[in-house]
Image: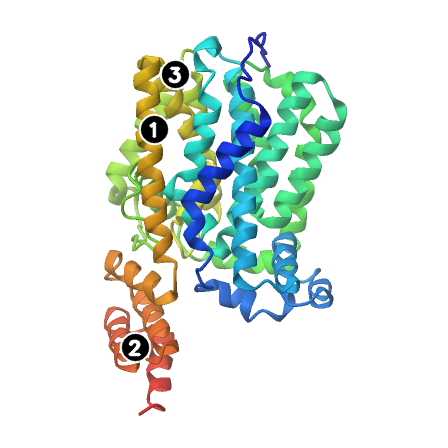
Amino acid sequence: MRRLPMRSLRTETPAAVWLWLTLAVCISYANVLSGDFQFDDYNVIVNAAQVHTWENWLAHLGSGIRPLLKFSYTLNWTMGTGVIGFHLTNLLIHLANAYLVYRLAQEFVQQQWQQEKLQQVPLFGALLFAVHPINTEAVTYICGRSASLMALFYLAALLCYVLGRAQQNKMLLYVATPLLFVLALGVKETAVTLPLALLIWEFCCGGRWKISLKQMWPCWVVLIVATLLFLFSDSYAAQMQRSAAFNDMQGNVATQLAAFAYLMRQWALPLWLNIDPDLPLLKNLADAFLPHALFIALVGLMLLCWRKRPWLSFALAWAMLHLIPLYLLLPRIDIANERQLYLAAWPLLLALVIELRLWLDSRIFQIAIATLLLAFVSLTVLRNQVYANEIALWQDTAMKSPHKARVHNNLGSAYLLAQRNAEARSEFTTALQLDPQLDKARDNLRLLEKFP
């Protein structure tokens, strides 16, 4: 991996960086602390006895999935700080991730010939990551912690690998990196992409793949062991069987390309954020012509920029790695969630900031970044207000996904909990009109019959 001489790139002290990032997170997310539990929070936290005591957590350790994620829920629950404790933990995780993005951006910029001109890029990129509204689902929604906590260990593993390669530090390469990889897998199984992510970093920073493979062999060992554990785990096996029956390969390729295009649009224009988007299940490639064309164009751009603008290639390769391959093999009922972008999109911000700095003079560049920060903070604060309670969340979602039966059923359930029975009945009826096979809505209507 090429490492160019450092020329005082570290213009900010660590304390100053932490201060700026903390300020950005506090301003953007101060209004989440009064938010309530939402949707799946009840299934995996509030009504899940296995995370209410350490004895229960230990008892379910060998029979469930995502043990480290549940560990974090148990820690919050047993501390007795209520919902505000869960929110504070999510914010601390997000703050730590913003700092990891800053450090990784520093290391990446040091590999570029334009490093002297890019001194402000790491901090500005991390600030944009800290306040980008696309991250609200992973930060404000408590269950979104699965994405942010996994990203914490994933990014830390990448940073340890990068520093270990640069410093020839065997502890970082052969102990810290694979250990953090294991922790990431303990939070969310989608962390299996880490070895490929390390290769992408190497290719975009002048590394040689043969040498790189020798340095990252512990991660490949972890990947093989984890794959075997997943295959022989009853919980994961059941999930994989459900996924296999969800769609055929051609339909799944079309669906995931459409999901990729949707998520890229949400990142670029985060004006219609939606916790439950109404995306169609496609059956053949002809149904995804425009997403297919977009994907081919981005692959072409990635290959074209590989040598002269490696940050663009890195951003596109990283995003594709985290948004497409896994979901081709293991399709899901929820075709796309914005929290998928939490780990996938930070190099896009890095590339954006680098391009702005190269194209604009220093003053205009700073004005552009300040404008983006202001816009992102405003959109994040507004989006957080939607998570104030379940009724507000599902009213917003029903407005954006009016033809999705599950959304109306969830809004009806929120009304039912608030004893707004007439509105609940209307939503359950709408859900059944949209999907007569939705048994949950039918059961909810029967439940309403018990009330006057």
Gap in Å between the C-alphas at discs 2 and 3? Answer: 53 Å
Query: Which of pointers 3 and 1 lies earlier in the amino acid sequence?
Result: 3
Cα separation, mark 3 vs mark 1, equals 27 Å
Q: How far apart in space, not on screen, are marks 2 and 1 (Cα)?
A: 44 Å
Residue 190 shows in the view: no
Q: Which residue is under mark 2?
A: 424
Position of 14 relative to 259 (above/below) = above
| Tag 3 secondary structure | loop
Q: Which residue is mark 3?
A: 305
**Sequence order check: which comes first, mark 2 or mark 3?**
3
The residue depicted at 59 percent of the width and 27 percent of the height is 14
Which comes before the other along the chain, label 2 or label 1?
A: 1
One can see residue 67 in this view: yes
Label 3 is placed on what type of residue?
Cys
Residue carrying label 1: 370
Q: Position of residue 242 (x, y in %)?
A: 49, 59
- Quarter occupied by the C terminus: bottom left
For label 2, count other residues whose C-alpha is less than 10 Å away and answer few (under 14), some (14-19) or many (20+).
Answer: many
Few, some or many residues within 10 Å of mark 3 (<14, 14–19, 20+): some
> What kind of residue is marked 2?
Ala
